[in-house]
Image (spheres, rainbow, N blue to C red):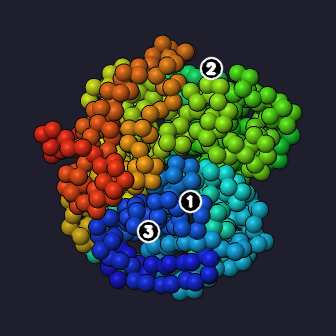
Amino acid sequence: MANGLAGTTLRIDLSTGDIKREPTDEKLFADWYGGRGVITKILYDEVPRDADPLGPENVFIMTAGVMSGCLIPGGAKIEFGSISPLTNGHGDSNMGGHLGPQLKFAGYDLVIFKGISPKPVYLYINNDTVELRDANEYWGMGSLDCEAKFKKDLGEEFEIATIGPAAENGVLYSCITHDFGRQAGRTGQGTVMGSKKLKAIAISGNKSIKVHDIAGLKKQVSDIILRTQNHPNMEPWQKYGTSFFIRWANDNAVIPTYNYKTTHYEDIDKIDGDQLVDNCLVTHKACFGCWMNCGKYAKASVPGKKEVYLEGPEYETGSLCGPNIGMKNIQEVSYINWLFDNQGIDTMSGGGVIGFTMECFEKGLLTTDDLEGHTMNWGSLDDIEHLVDMIVNKRGIGATLAKGTKRAAEHIGKGSEKFAMQVKGQEMSGYDGRWAPGMLLSYMTADIGAHHNRSWTITVDMAEGRETTEGRAKIVAYLQHIRPLFDVWCICRLFWGELDITPEETVDSLNLITGWDVSFDETLRTSEKIWNLTRCHYIERNKNNGRTFDYPPARSWEDKITTGPGAGKGVTKEQVEELLDDYYAARGWDNNGNPTKELLEDLGIDFAAKNLEKVGFLGTPIPGGIPKVRGEKYKPKAF
């Protein structure tokens, strides 16, 4: 058993129920580091390019990488991956909690599912016992309700991941839920689980993980604990979690408001972090081995609704299920958070779909006839609850909205494409990029569709100038190398982003665990390799020039911000084109957004160049050759 690895990989054929154990491929993990790196390579190698994301040929992968469970800062993540039904490209999503460490403590690094079960099942892992068990009694249950029942049925020592009715019914932006509020929310990974009739995963283990230098690791982590406990950012994170960004984003004119019409919300003081802590908080909550305690377990009490418990709302949920849809009460925002969590819907895409629908109704593109006699007015909880039921059960227009805003706008037409706030089919996270051009470029070029975790650049935009695109592309490319590295390592990035743990220290931890002796620059190169392979995979599946897929909706350049500090601000279409031109040059891609043979060979993935050439979209050679340095190192300040 290699250092940092549990030693065993599971391959599970859900069609037949066959479960195979094999030694974990140590070279695969050494070359791709685990997490989304290993997922990237497996998806590229094993899924046919024409495979239906909801069909038996798509594989669904779960892995905890080499650092999760090793008692390092933020070492609690688990990564899921498959071809995304939302984007038809590489998809991955991760979550914290306790499932990742537990998978390794049970003795497993990687679980690969294929096929479709003929009946609902769940995966049961208890150390050496691995079984597919009947899940018929759990099918149809809400994600949170289902986890509680599993805890009662199997025991508190089991860590559980579940899906809800949305995933069972094929809502394309369904999530995976764990620890009563941790979600792998993006790219529809829950939907793929549902398509395979895999209701849940239950894991218990008590084995150990071999570490290269346990004494060195213990000293390093102890030093980090002592150093970070008095960091000035620790107190607000422990008190509010990410919810304190609600007011910050509003003050800095980036919070999505009324479906991204504007970036300033007049009722922010009714839904901000203080409101959450003062009126909803039950207790603070942490992931495995973490002393930040940024999770907030809350209670929502709304007159006429049942009292519910949830984790959150965190910033993304608070923004997209708050100002973005016109909510004016923290209890109602929290209730929507619970509603999405229990139905198993990604709150980011869910909030985006609700906002899009409200604007369609406001503009007369949808009527009460489309909504079973209901309205869809800004801030109406009853309207939202009814629409969510239509979406989950795919009734009427709900079946269209279950496909996400891109497909819904294509169906509704009448100019609605302009304000379907997505890229590549995935709804934008909780930041408006019109007065933050680096953030806009981050959305445009994210490999899994619009998502903030790939490159968060708002403080860069503030520092470097919010009305210029100059120099932004190289920084975005660099951040797309370093930020997703944490999803490769399966650890939380907050200690780097907020508490000033350096990337070099994290690589030191990697080496202390594995004994690999890699440098920080080597890890960046591996991350660049991963990024380019996901790009190639997307182009191969969707068969067009990469630039075709990298544009945001027209609102991003046609509509200026209307209110607040950003009133009158915005980018032009010319600036959008400049951002893409600069970005492709920084990446070493041609101006069509396609990786070149020279670049892919330089990264050691020449096989991808051959495949791109076969489909006719290999990048044309760049005059002067590819740049030696691709990206510009930059450490954004936290907030």
Q: Position of residue 229 (x, y in %)?
A: 40, 50
Compared to residue 90, the image places residue 638 above or below, namely above
Compared to residue 140, the image places residue 631 above or below, namely above
Query: Mark 1 falls on what kind of element?
Result: loop
Q: Position of residue 446 (x, y in %)?
A: 42, 43
Q: Which residue is painted at 69% across and 65% down in the image?
A: 147
The dot on residue 52 is 1
Q: Mark 3 is on which residue type?
A: Glu
- State the quadrant of the C terminus: top left
Left/right placement of residue 566 relative to residue 455 reads: right
Q: Position of residue 31 (x, y in %)?
A: 28, 67
Compared to residue 253, the image places residue 307 above or below, namely below
If you read the primary sequence from the N terminus, does the residue marked by circle 1 or circle 3 appear first? 3
If you read the primary sequence from the N terminus, does the residue marked by circle 1 or circle 2 appear first? 1
Query: Mark 2 falls on what kind of element?
Result: loop
Specify few, some or many for label 1: CA neighbours under 10 Å numbering under 14, 14-19, or 20 or more. some
Q: Nearer the viewer, residue 148 or 456?
A: 456
Q: Mark 2 is on which residue type?
A: Glu
Specify few, some or many for label 3: CA neighbours under 10 Å numbering under 14, 14-19, or 20 or more. few
